[in-house]
Image (cartoon, rainbow, N blue to C red):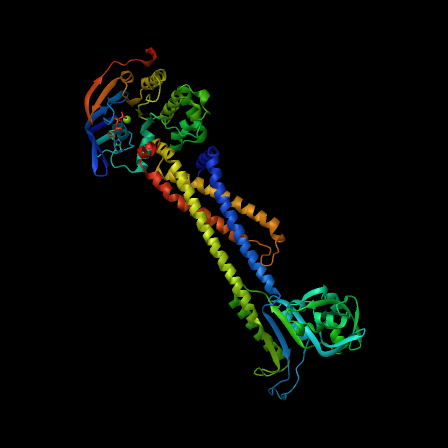
């Protein structure tokens, strides 16, 4: 599903440049649930943004579902994002003047889906994340966990190949985090490929594989025994 | 591009962002409102000046006749030419679309005029109703000669202020009878003339009455016209010269006068006076065009600013939309579609409000130099369109930039 080879990325700020990714080789097959760990500043988000075609690598190759992602213009990049990827952000990134339902329906709008079908599908995904009753609420009327679930429903709405989540539980308390992880595990159970950036050990162990980044390189990549969030007792 | 789906998306955005929409709309609407009112005041000033100068009978053309000076078709020079009603009717009929005011005149000099024990010798002129304005006379009492007087050969007279002072010594004159050369006339009006005493020592009576009491048949001593006003002095001059030349030629042909005879028929126009009017009017026009253009520029700058702020405010939203699959052009289209829609609606609201205000208040404004301020509807519509188009162009650049920043950069914008 995802295949990256020798990926490099530097940030340039004036005269200084910061080499963040220093040759990442890594692949993810369909149906996997992978967490990316590492200390702050190790380049986790940078990697995920490149995987999400929100940013571009300086060097190396990236193949997504058999398509080489290279030198795309914004138009094609947008189309690929819409077709292949679903995003879940730490800060939710919902459109604040749109209701939960409208937020979830957004990716479908850009797929050119008709309004009534859009609403129907969006409602389906809202039900899936357990927020059918909150469909008409604005993000400002929802709790953090609810917002993140709306964001998950939105990420699912376009039926993407891969779900990318950058610290999806970063802004949530433990209880809510586990609820959200339970939801994400359920989605993975249905076969969706999921990548999660986190720096929380317990969250990482709820995935099936942990990739450890340090100073722009993968220092460890191992399969783990998945801990089911549902069974976890929260403190 | 302007699909129903997008309209729905835009209505949603407008509906959910009422304050933003309202403020945008308010500034556009008030801009248009001010612009239209300004243009209307400009027009009002133009009207006011026109009114002030109307009394100068801008563009007056006078025709009178004399004796011939050139032998023509076997007729000796020295033949006296006299115009009559047919000459007048011919000129009027031929130029009815060009003429504004018109009157034939039959006058007699030095007519002894008496009221009780007072008397004086005055020039008596038989004229039509328009002659008041042709001569720039203002009534201080009563009325002027009217159509009824002409139709029924009424023996009514309008006397000059000096005549009034001579004969009536400041007492009421209206309704009193004066004796002119042995015939009783009823005084129906008293006028003043900016020409002063010389012009105020005249008595006006209906033309038909004058022709009858002086046994003049249908003879006329002179004819006076003013032509319709033009926007430009140049046009007015051209129209006036063409009219004069044609009239002179027609009269010469009709009375068998040599074309080169420049004594028998005199056509004179006083357009020189009118030049002041046209100059002033031009100045006002330019001034208000200047003000209007400045206002439009200010409006465009305002709309651009609003667009800039809106795009800035929506940067994060744009990032989100792009992350979930919006193409740059769909972002640009969305922003422009919304802004064009809002500015157009607001522009027309401002337009309608200003037009309503003008309709209600305009006709009551009759100050010295402002009169019935109003706007040309097509000019008003054009300004709205200019503002909307300019707003769209001004909005395009920030929208284009926002649509092309990387989504991560847009998303980072907290
Ligand atoms: N747009 C940018 N411009 C310049 N430097 C950047 C930019 N984005 C990230 N960096 C730098 O690159 C390095 C890696 O950043 P990145 O966001 O990938 O870290 P991270 O692993 O996600 O950290 P965290 O756990 O704190 O989120 C950091 O040192 C950061 O300062
Ligand atoms: Mg990060």
Whether residue A151 is visible to the viewer of this picture, yes or no, is yes
Give me the residue at 47% from left, 38% from top.
B21
- For the residue pair B319 and B181, the one nearer the viewer reads as B181
Q: Position of residue B161 (x, y in %)?
A: 70, 69
Q: Quadrant of the N terminus of chain B?
A: top left
The reply, left or right, for residue A92 in relation to residue B230 is left
Q: Position of residue B264 (x, y in %)?
A: 62, 82
Give me the residue at 33% from left, 25% from top.
A90
Count of numbered badges drawn on the protein: 0
> Quick check: A74 above or below A179?
below
The image quadrant in which ligand 1 is located: top left
- For the residue pair B115 and B104, the one nearer the viewer reads as B115
For this orientation, the residue located farthest to the front is B169
Q: Position of residue A226 (x, y in %)?
A: 27, 14
> Quick check: B293 above or below A58?
below
> Quick check: B259 above or below A209?
below
Q: Quadrant of residue A151?
A: top left
Q: Quadrant of the C terminus of chain B?
A: top left
For this orientation, the residue located farthest to the right is B116
Q: Quadrant of residue A82?
A: top left
Q: Position of residue B96 (x, y in %)?
A: 62, 67
The reply, left or right, for residue B232 in relation to residue A154 is right
The reply, left or right, for residue A216 in relation to residue B394 is left
- For the residue pair B215 and A79, the one nearer the viewer reads as B215
Whether residue B85 is visible to the viewer of this picture, yes or no, is no
Give me the residue at 27% from left, 22% from top.
A30
């Amino acid at each position: 599903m995802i295949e990256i080879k020798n990926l490099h990325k530097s940030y340039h700020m004036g005269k200084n440049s910061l080499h963040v990714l220093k040759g990442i080789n890594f692949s993810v097959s369909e149906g996997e649930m992978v967490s990316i760990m590492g200390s702050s500043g190790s380049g986790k988000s940078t990697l995920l943004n490149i995987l999400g075609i929100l940013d571009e690598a300086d060097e190396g190759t990236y193949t997504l579902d058999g398509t080489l992602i290279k030198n795309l213009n914004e138009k094609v990049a947008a189309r690929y994002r819409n077709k292949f990827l679903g995003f879940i952000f730490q800060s939710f990134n919902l459109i604040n003047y749109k209701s939960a339902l409208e937020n979830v329906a957004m990716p479908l709008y850009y797929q050119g889906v008709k309004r009534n079908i859009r609403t129907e599908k969006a409602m389906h995904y809202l039900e899936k994340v357990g927020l059918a009753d909150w469909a008409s609420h604005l993000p400002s009327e929802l709790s953090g966990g609810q917002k993140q679930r709306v964001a998950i429903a939105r990420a699912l709405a376009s039926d993407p190949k891969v779900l990318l989540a950058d610290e999806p539980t970063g802004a949530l308390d433990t209880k809510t985090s586990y609820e959200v992880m339970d939801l994400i595990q359920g989605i993975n159970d249905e076969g969706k490929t999921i990548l999660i950036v986190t720096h929380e050990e317990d969250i990482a162990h709820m995935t099936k594989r942990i990739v450890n980044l340090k100073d722009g390189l993968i220092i460890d990549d191992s399969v783990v025994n998945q801990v089911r969030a549902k069974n976890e007792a929260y403190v | 591009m302007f699909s129903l789906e997008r309209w729905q998306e835009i209505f949603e955005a407008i509906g959910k962002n009422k304050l933003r929409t309202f403020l945008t709309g308010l500034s556009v609407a008030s801009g248009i409102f001010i612009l239209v009112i300004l243009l209307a005041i400009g027009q009002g000033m133009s009207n006011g000046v026109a009114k002030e100068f109307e009394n100068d009978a801008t563009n007056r053309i006078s025709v009178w006749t004399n004796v011939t000076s050139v032998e023509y078709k076997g007729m000796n020079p020295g033949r006296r030419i006299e115009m009559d009603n047919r000459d007048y009717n011919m000129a009027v009929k031929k130029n009815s679309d060009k003429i504004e005011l018109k009157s034939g005149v039959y006058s007699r000099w030095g007519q002894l005029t008496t009221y009780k024990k007072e008397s004086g010798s005055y020039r008596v002129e038989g004229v039509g109703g328009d002659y008041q304005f042709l001569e720039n006379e203002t009534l201080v009492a009563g009325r002027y000669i009217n159509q009824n007087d002409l139709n029924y050969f009424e023996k009514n007279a309008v006397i000059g202020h000096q005549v009034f002072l001579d004969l009536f010594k400041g007492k009421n004159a209206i309704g009193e009878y004066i004796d002119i050369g042995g015939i009783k006339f009823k005084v129906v009006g008293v006028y003043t003339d900016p020409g002063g005493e010389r012009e105020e020592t005249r008595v006006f009576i209906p033309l038909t009455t004058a022709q009858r009491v002086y046994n003049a048949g249908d003879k006329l001593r002179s004819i006076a016209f003013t032509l319709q006003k033009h926007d430009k002095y140049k046009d007015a001059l051209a129209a006036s010269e063409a009219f004069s030349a044609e009239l002179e030629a027609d009269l010469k042909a009709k009375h068998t006068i040599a074309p080169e005879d420049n004594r028998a028929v005199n056509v004179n126009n006083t357009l020189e006076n009118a030049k002041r009017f046209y100059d002033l009017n031009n100045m006002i026009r330019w001034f208000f065009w200047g003000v209007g253009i400045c206002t439009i520029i200010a409006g465009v700058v305002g709309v651009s600013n609003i667009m800039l702020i809106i795009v800035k405010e929506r940067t994060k939203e744009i990032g989100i939309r792009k992350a979930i699959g919006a193409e740059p052009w769909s972002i640009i289209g969305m922003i422009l579609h919304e802004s064009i829609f809002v500015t157009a609606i607001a522009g027309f609201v401002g337009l309608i409000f200003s037009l309503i205000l003008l309709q209600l208040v305009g006709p009551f404004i009759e100050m010295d130099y402002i009169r019935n301020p109003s706007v040309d509807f097509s000019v008003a519509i054009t300004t709205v369109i200019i503002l909307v188009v300019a707003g769209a162009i001004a909005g395009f650049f920030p929208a284009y930039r926002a649509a092309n920043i990387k989504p991560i950069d847009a998303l980072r914008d907290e």
